[in-house]
């Protein structure tokens, strides 16, 4: 089953849900960057392996879709949610994550370069999308297994 | 002279009047159908004995790139509220928080806002500031009493954009504390700085600023200083520059433009930089900056003399995505030492103290 938007992907705490909803937010709030990402991923067959999840990312040139795992990926990213959260919190950078084998990208040179370009476009869209901070906070909270509230019982404001 | 005595000498009713007249929130006209790209922030810096605290409440009416920024379905822009909270013990650390509209209260026409558990309110001659990090590890609660006249500068034209505006309160005295990772730092008696900026502009445009504020270590020393320099992004063309000096709470002298010569020496190298929001470190991981090791300024005019040197120490970077391209704008918040000597209207001037200088666009 493919998922394009949050309406078709529940906030179930999974990486797949986070990714689909974040792409939906970028499409809504930074559409030019979503378009650039879609064009950059056109024809690519990307597999993302995060913790125990396997999801496929593909694009027809105008829409980026998150779908079920597929065996014919041309580039694969393997990491875990702790590493993703360390990256987004500034605890480590891409280089350190790669050198420490916490983030592994496998594929042909052209495919890996294209994937990195797409990753940067995704990040550029994410930092221009107001909703991403909350989506990331939800994802972080789901990994902590606690409610997203501070000790006053208030939504604390998302840090991104 | 102690801080309390100095405060008593300041023209308190005039200060109060000046702040009531000028330091109120303008709010984004885009939220009611006016032009977008409005930015406004309240900035506070407290120089504590053991910690520097920088708190910035900002409201912008869009985040996305300008050519795609979608106003809401009613054609109105939404305001986005952010809190930057930075503290410097040995090095800077902190974060930028974003807040959902339901957690934001902004009182236009007043100096009062609330972002979640953090807030600012001007009442009874004091700014009451609460600021808290999203994980609760940093929590500041301070009352800042202005002891110098505010200076308001309207309609500063730069480049091809609409003007920007600011109000500066160069000196305040603090009561309160900040808790960092379980340790409470007493801020009673600490000197502080405040400014309020607003206007329509986009990050990434052809402009940059160097903006510094310094206060003496001795709270009895009556001098306060603010340094402002606006230039093009390449720092090859200065649009305006000035050093503003207050004595005993009153604005005493402004060295402007041709009265002032500014020079930089060296380039500061860092092995570590605090970058906020943290995720922006993935887009802008560079440690290379063109923050100078020293910035010096010499003023001369109408019989007055001034020489100052800011020596940089630690830096934090507030990194903002550009509004019109995929680049970023970096606001380097640089702590350091300020040493100033001079003679103003026949009176000797000497400042030796801490300062924070912002170097934007580098």
Image (spheres, helix red, strand yellow):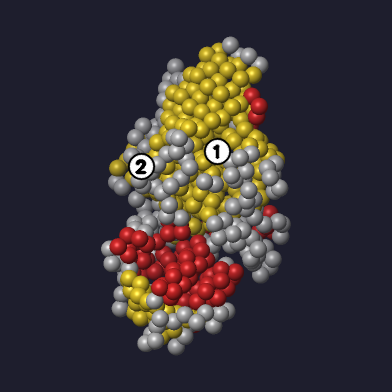
Residue B333 location (% of width, % of height) = 47, 42
Question: Residue at (50%, 82%) from the top-left corner?
Answer: A43
Of B34 and B141, nearer the camera is B34
Of B211 and B182, nearer the camera is B211
Q: Kindly identify which numbered label has been placed on residue B134.
A: none
Nearer the camera: disc 2 or disc 1 = 1
B44 to the left or right of B243: left
- What is the secondary structure assignment of the residue under circle 2? loop
Whether residue B308 is visible here, answered yes or no, is yes
Is B28 above or below relative to B77? above
The tag earlier along the polypeptide, 2 or 1, is 2
Q: Residue furthest top?
A: B346
Residue B359 location (% of width, % of height) = 52, 41
Question: Residue at (44%, 88%) from the top-left corner?
Answer: A1
Q: Residue furthest front?
A: A109
Residue B267 location (% of width, % of height) = 45, 38
- Chain letter for mark 1: B
Is B203 above or below relative to B344? below
Residue B82 location (% of width, % of height) = 51, 53
B225 to the left or right of B76: left
List the residue tagged with mark 1: B210
**Classed neighbour count for the residue bearing mark 1: other residues with Cα under 10 Å, few (<14), some (14–19), many (≥20):** some
Is B295 above or below relative to B120? above
Q: Are marks 2 and 1 on the same chain?
A: yes
List the residue tagged with mark 2: B91
CA separation, marks 2 and 1? 21 Å
- Chain letter for mark 2: B
Q: Quadrant of residue A89?
A: bottom left
């Amino acid at each position: 089953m493919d998922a394009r938007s949050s309406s078709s992907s529940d906030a179930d705490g999974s990486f797949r849900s986070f990714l689909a909803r974040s792409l939906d937010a970028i499409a809504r709030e930074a559409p030019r960057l979503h378009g650039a990402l879609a064009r950059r991923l056109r024809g690519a067959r990307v597999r993302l392996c995060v913790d125990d999840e396997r999801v496929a990312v593909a694009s027809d040139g105008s829409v980026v879709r998150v779908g079920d795992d597929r065996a014919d990926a041309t580039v694969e990213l393997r990491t875990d949610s702790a590493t993703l959260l360390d990256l987004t919190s500034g605890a480590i950078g891409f280089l350190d994550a790669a050198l420490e084998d916490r983030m592994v990208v496998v594929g042909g040179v052209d495919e890996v370069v294209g994937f990195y370009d797409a990753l940067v476009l995704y990040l550029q869209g994410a930092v221009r999308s107001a909703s991403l901070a909350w989506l990331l906070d939800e994802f972080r909270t789901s990994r902590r297994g606690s409610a997203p509230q501070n000790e006053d019982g208030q939504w604390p404001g998302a840090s991104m | 002279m102690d801080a309390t005595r100095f405060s008593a000498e300041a023209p308190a009713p005039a200060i109060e009047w000046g702040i009531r007249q000028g330091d109120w929130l303008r709010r984004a006209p885009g939220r009611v159908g006016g032009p977008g790209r409005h930015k406004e922030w309240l900035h506070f810096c407290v120089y504590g004995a053991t910690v520097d605290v920088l708190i910035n409440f900002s409201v912008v009416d869009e985040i996305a790139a300008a050519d795609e920024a979608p106003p809401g379905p009613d054609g109105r822009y939404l305001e986005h509220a952010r809190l930057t909270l930075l503290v410097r013990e040995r090095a800077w650390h902190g974060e930028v928080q974003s807040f959902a509209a339901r957690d934001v209260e902004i009182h236009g026409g007043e100096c009062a806002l609330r972002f979640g558990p953090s807030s600012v309110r001007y009442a009874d001659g004091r700014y009451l500031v609460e600021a808290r990090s999203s994980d609760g590890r940093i929590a500041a609660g301070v009352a800042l009493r202005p002891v110098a006249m505010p200076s308001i500068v309207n309609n500063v034209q730069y480049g091809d954009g609409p003007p920007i505006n600011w109000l500066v309160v160069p000196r305040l005295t603090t009561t309160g504390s900040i808790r960092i990772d379980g340790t409470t730092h007493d801020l009673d008696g600490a000197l502080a700085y405040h400014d309020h900026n607003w206007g329509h502009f986009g990050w990434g445009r052809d402009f940059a600023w160097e903006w510094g504020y310094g206060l003496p270590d001795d709270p009895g020393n009556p001098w306060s200083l603010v340094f402002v320099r606006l230039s093009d992004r390449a720092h090859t063309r200065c649009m305006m520059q000035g050093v503003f000096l207050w004595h005993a709470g009153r604005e005493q002298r402004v060295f402007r433009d041709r009265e002032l010569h500014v020079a930089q020496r060296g380039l500061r190298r860092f092995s570590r930089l605090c970058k906020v929001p943290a995720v922006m470190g993935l887009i802008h991981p560079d440690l290379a900056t063109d923050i100078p090791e020293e910035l010096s300024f010499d003023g001369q005019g109408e019989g007055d003399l001034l020489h100052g040197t800011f020596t940089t120490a630690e830096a934090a970077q507030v990194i903002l995505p550009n509004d019109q391209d995929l680049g970023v704008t970096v606001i380097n918040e640089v702590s350091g030492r300020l040493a100033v000597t001079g003679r103003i209207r026949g009176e000797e001037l000497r400042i030796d103290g801490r300062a924070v200088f912002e170097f934007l666009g580098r």
